[in-house]
Image: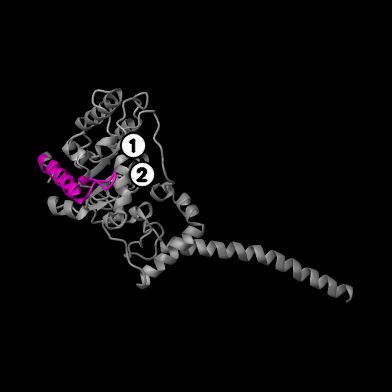
Amino acid sequence: MNSSTSVSEAAAWRRLLWAYPVACVLIAALTVMLITVLDPYDTGRFALFGGYGVPGFGQRLIAASVARAPDTQAAILGNSTMQLIDPARLTERTGWRFVSLTMTYSGPVEQLATAGWLLRHHDGTTAPLLKALVIGMDASWCQSDGKLDIRQPFPFWLYGDSRLEYVWSLANMHGIEAALHKLKLMIGTERQFRPDGYNNFEPEIAGREATAALDLDKGSHPVAATGTGDFAAVPLLRDFFPGVPATTAIALVFMPHYFIDLPVPGSPAAEEEDRCKALFRALATSRPNTTVIDMRNEDDLARDRRNFWDRNHYRMPIARLIENKIAAAFHQAGGV
């Protein structure tokens, strides 16, 4: 080997070493670009293809598509305690096209972030203003220690305003996997998630009914207050209300719960919960077309274990009862 050959080989190696990172960057950029234009979560951002909906990604990831659909007129928000409320039945009773944006293990912060996305896509310009919002309120809405816990990771980037954060959050293996599912949906080899977002969990929980029923015996009547009375969800909802058109009817629904976890009447725990409910009622009276439906009480419904799968989740007949109360409230308010 002479010196000229050695210099030539070194130059070739240098070119190869430069070409490798450049190629990696280009491939990564093209991959992110492809994921972005495929719009796997159907957000409408940068999408080159439309009209396909979303596969069954899970509630936290499908709601962005369901919420922005132009024919959405009303929505159900909440966690699994609202999941059995069927948007099709509310549509039938009100004439408004309801969708379900419920998400398991979610609380006020995540639910109102989703509602904000919903409202931004129904601002009277890109789509008609919303007719109604139903917000299911469980114990997380009355957390009294000045905090609002987020129990499971939530994709705030998916429901936020930053397009840069959205693209950055797609640039990972989850984004690639989501894009592949979207491609399968587009070519017809994967099914679309139900367009109104409803997911009936009863068939799944019925398969383990005996195990679920054991939960009914695990609670204990709370007596002591759990915090200082600083209900952080109240100002959060108060700040949210001005962004909702005055013509949009809102129902705040305190969801039924098996009695064993409800506070002992007259105890500090009961007084704490009553103060929380009173604050939300005051919020409701401060806004037109807003009502409170309180089903979180120790009554015959709450004491009958036949109404519940476990301490948190009621059965379908109770869901039908709640749907009727929601529809009646909207009729009474004159919105329907």
Q: Residue at x 29, y 31 (%)?
A: 221
Q: Which residue is mark 1?
A: 140
Residue 308 located within the stretch drawn in magenta: yes
Q: How many marks?
A: 2
Cα–Cα gap, marks 1 and 2: 9 Å
- The answer to which of 288 and 143 lies nearer the viewer is 143
Look at label 1 and name its amino acid: Ser
Task: Please give the residue where the numbered disc 2 appears in the rendered image.
Answer: 106
Question: First in sequence: mark 1 or mark 2?
Answer: 2
Residue at 32% in and 54% down: 208
Q: Position of residue 164 (x, y in %)?
A: 47, 51
- Residue 78: give x, y in percent of width and height: 29, 44
Classify residue 220 by image quadrant. top left
Of the pair 159 and 221, the residue shown nearer to us: 221
Residue 187, can we see it? yes
> Considering the numbered disc 2 on the image, is that residue within a helix, a strand or a loop?
loop
Queried whether the magenta region covers residue 124, the answer comes back as: no
In the figure, 331 relative to 269: above or below?
A: below
Side of 227 relative to 335 (left or right): right
Stretch in magenta: 306-332
Q: Residues within 10 Å of mark 1 (few under 14, many from 20)?
A: some
- In the drawing, does residue 256 fall left or right of residue 104? left
Q: Position of residue 210 (x, y in %)?
A: 30, 51
The image quadrant of residue 19 is bottom right
The amino acid beneath tag 2 is Ser
- What element does badge 1 sit on? helix
